[in-house]
Image (spheres, coloured by chain):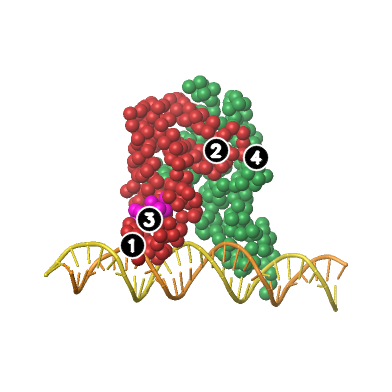
Chain colours: A green, B red, C orange, D yellow
Amino acid sequence: MPRAGLTPDLIVLAAATLADRDGLDRVTVSAVARLVGVKPASVYAHLEGADDLLRRVTQLALEEMADRAADAVAGRSGRDALAAWAQAFRTYAFAHPGRYAASHRPLGRTEALAGAGPRHTALSTSILRGYDVPEADHVHAVRLLGATIHGFLDLEAAGSFDHSAPPAADSWPRVVDSLDALLRTWPSSSAR
Amino acid sequence: MPRAGLTPDLIVLAAATLADRDGLDRVTVSAVARLVGVKPASVYAHLEGADDLLRRVTQLALEEMADRAADAVAGRSGRDALAAWAQAFRTYAFAHPGRYAASHRPLGRTEALAGAGPRHTALSTSILRGYDVPEADHVHAVRLLGATIHGFLDLEAAGSFDHSAPPAADSWPRVVDSLDALLRTWPSSSAR
DNA sequence: CTCGTTTACCTACAGGGTGTAGGTTTGGGT
DNA sequence: ACCCAAACCTACACCCTGTAGGTAAACGAG
């Protein structure tokens, strides 16, 4: 019997593929084993278990998203950077729904600080350079950006926008416009 | 052997309790059966299965949140209404993390239109009455509000804000301020 | 108050996922 | 050519889902 030549990375990639194709909740050690042509028990030699598998998919998704986001903001600033940055996430969420869903799973402090987390923080902070947001408010602005983009994509993926009239895609540019407007007028917004 | 006197509602309530205590992913037919003191098979007489159980928890959570949100906006308008409405969700998310997580699960068109969905839409629309947002933009504004609040609470629950300095609670009022500012200046924001 | 019907709950079982123990094969290094 | 680490296997125990069919408690009718 030829050997599959598995590595943890190959298994995680298969899991991510499966997540995108069948949904994150269908990602099981057994299903991944089937996909790579191996018995379930063999997978446990490369990973610590189901939790570990999902955690690695989360980390993969966060890294990939950071890559794409970095690409998007490169060479842009202000509104352009903001729009491209946000669009990078939306494109990723559509292309890789399972990975995107995985990216929301909680991570331990250690994994979060070691992985792509800081890159995401740095990227969204860099967007603020095109606006007049005071240094002290950067954290809040970054959180607001992240929350709004994540919230929109999450609700869109959950179909929450499918029950009212205009397609979610019509609201997307308005969301980006709003965030831009908010950042442009930030000082006055904190002045009540 | 005394009879437990189960009803679908009692089972769903037990499931919701379990979700809040142990996490939504620990909600299984078996666990709920244990909690109410019955064998797993007995639960299937009252529900159609695990999917049905989770769907009902989702609906329960949406109804409860609509109740609290309605309570919060009653007798308020403008910024007060917005802040109270947003706070209602945050309070609920803290008090009932499992239910709150369940509220994000996708629902079919039928369940969504029959349940609390329309109430939530009506509630957030009512907040716009305190602002000068043109009728045609209401949908977009409602989606923006929902996305931002949901996104913030979801990221906060996932611990995404625990890795940088100020506690998430410090950013929350800034988010509400920002949304208020955005709605107050809405017309100019759509004018680029 | 007994009797029959309903139905709440049961046991038993099949199927699939997780995870461990321990055996067998494969391939690279010496 | 051989050896050893590792990749992969079978076999098993355990839990969750869901179905089939049985037992017994409640409840209304006479």
Instruction: State how far apart marks 2 and 4 are (Cα).
Output: 13 Å
**Mark drawn on residue B3:** 1
Instruction: Please name which of the two marks, 3 or 1, marks the residue nearer to the observer.
Output: 1
The residue closer to the viewer here, A17 or A73, is: A17
Q: What residue type is labelled 1?
A: Arg
- Tell us which disc is closer to us: 1 or 2: 1
* Above/below status of B59 relative to B190: below
- Packing grade of label 4 (10 A; few <14, some 14-19, many >=20) is some
Q: Is tag 3's residue or tag 1's residue first in the polypeptide sequence?
A: 1
Q: Would residue B179 appear left or right of A132 to someone viewing this image?
A: left
Location of residue A176 in the rendering, given as x and y in whole percent from the top left corner: 51, 35
Please tell me whether residue B13 belongs to the stretch shown in magenta: yes
Q: Give the range drawn in magenta.
A: B8-16
* Labels 3 and 1 within one chain: yes
Q: Which chain carries label 2?
A: A
Q: What amino acid is at disc 4?
A: Pro
| Relative vertical location of residue A54 with respect to residue A153 in this rendering, above or below | below
Q: How far apart are marks 3 and 1 (CA)?
A: 14 Å
Badge 3: residue crowd in 10 Å (few <14, some 14–19, many ≥20): many
Disc sitting over residue A146 in the figure: 2
Pick the quarter of the image with the N terminus of chain B.
bottom left
Which circle marks residue A118 in the picture? 4
Q: Residue placed at 43% from the left, 50% from the top? A: B17
Residue to which mark 3 is pinned: B11
